[in-house]
Amino acid sequence: MAAWILHVDLDQFIAAVEVLRRPELRGRPVIVGGAGDPTQRAVVATASYEAREFGVHSGMPMRLAARKCPDAVFLPHDAPAYEAASEVVMDTLRSFDAVVQVLGWDEAFLGVSTEDPWAVARDIQREVEEKTQLSSSVGIGDNTLRAKLATGFAKPAGVFELTRDNWVEVMADRPTQALWGIGRKTARKLAELGYVTVADLARADPDVLAARLGPRIGPWCRTLALGAGSTTVRGTPYVPRSRSRETTFQQDLTSPSDVAAEVAALARRVADDVVAEGRPAARVAVKVRFAPFFTHTRSMTLPAPTSSAAVIEEAALEVLARFAADRPIRLLGVRAEFVPADPV
């Protein structure tokens, strides 16, 4: 039997979990984020398909989402509820004859050997819906990149196959940002070099890419455009790579002492998470969102891995000092990155 990789992605997962808890919201635009109050500063965690029709998307300020979709139902983010629903989904996926690699709450790769991957995909969708009442989309591929991208074409609640055979037909004329791993900033740099589409990037000179994007990232972007990806699914438990805390302020912070106090408090909360995780932190990062909406992140590697709250706090304040204190601040965040797990 042939080896296939399936990417299972739950449709509008967070919003769908909330609708299951509140059936009366079915068919209505639902927006989840922060404390669920669109008058406060927070960003959208997820939006139902009905809300997305109004242009609402993840990461958008809640206030802007309310202007775009004033009739939406706004709900607070409830991580424990989503984690519980995710556990049921992942246990369901593990009941199949497949290697399951969990990517997060709402998605996973499955490595399967079958002559009919479409039948397996449909079986997965039916079983997940039966166990959880949640719908899912499934991408079928001959590597992880193609399976992941295929899911985007499958949504919502569909199945799509993307392999070497139809890669050029499906992807060639799409913008480079359509590739998994290429974001807006990288796409802009590629466009400056004249590489606008996936086909452009596939024909790019690796040396030119390396000179602009770096010796590792540049050539790697070209391999993405060629459709290259891993053919291995690792059946390891999902292990968070970091823990973070952040706060959006209802009034901009302008006092350096207030900013430092907030970063110190966030660092101590993150340190508590590090201790609870039972894994030392190797790196500390600070995120600052200046008014009106410019976000920057800086980080440092710790002298040695640690779970010490004092060390993590001191590092966070050291990183904070690298930011210019010349603009009002609307959001602060602190992230502790764990020592990488040993390779399997």
Image (cartoon, grey):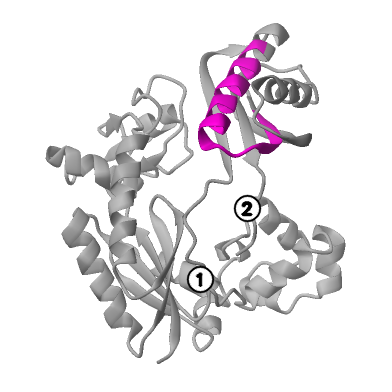
Residue in the image at 86% along x and 71% along y: 207
Residue in the image at 35% along x and 69% along y: 138
* Badge 1 density bin: few <14, some 14–19, many ≥20, Cα 10 Å: many
Q: Where is residue 259 in the image (x, y as percent from the top left)?
A: 66, 13
Residue extending furthest left? 24
Q: In this view, does 295 lie above or below 175?
A: above
The secondary structure type at the circle numbered 2 is: loop
Residue extending furthest front? 278
* Number of callouts: 2
- The magenta span reads 261-287
Residue 144 makes an appearance in the image: yes
Q: Is residue 297 above or below residue 140?
A: above
Q: Where is residue 304 in the image (x, y as percent from the top left)?
A: 77, 36
Where, by quadrant of the figure, is residue 23 drawn?
Answer: top left
Name the residue tied to disc 1: 233
Front residue of 56/258: it is: 258
Which comes before the other along the chain, label 1 or label 2?
A: 1
Residue in the image at 57% along x and 63% along y: 180
Name the residue tied to disc 2: 341
Q: Is 30 placed left or right of 21 in the picture?
A: right
Q: Position of residue 24 (x, y in %)?
A: 12, 38
Would residue 280 be counted in the magenta stretch? yes
Would residue 92 be counted in the magenta stretch? no
- Amino acid found under the numbered disc labelled 1: Val
The secondary structure type at the circle numbered 1 is: loop
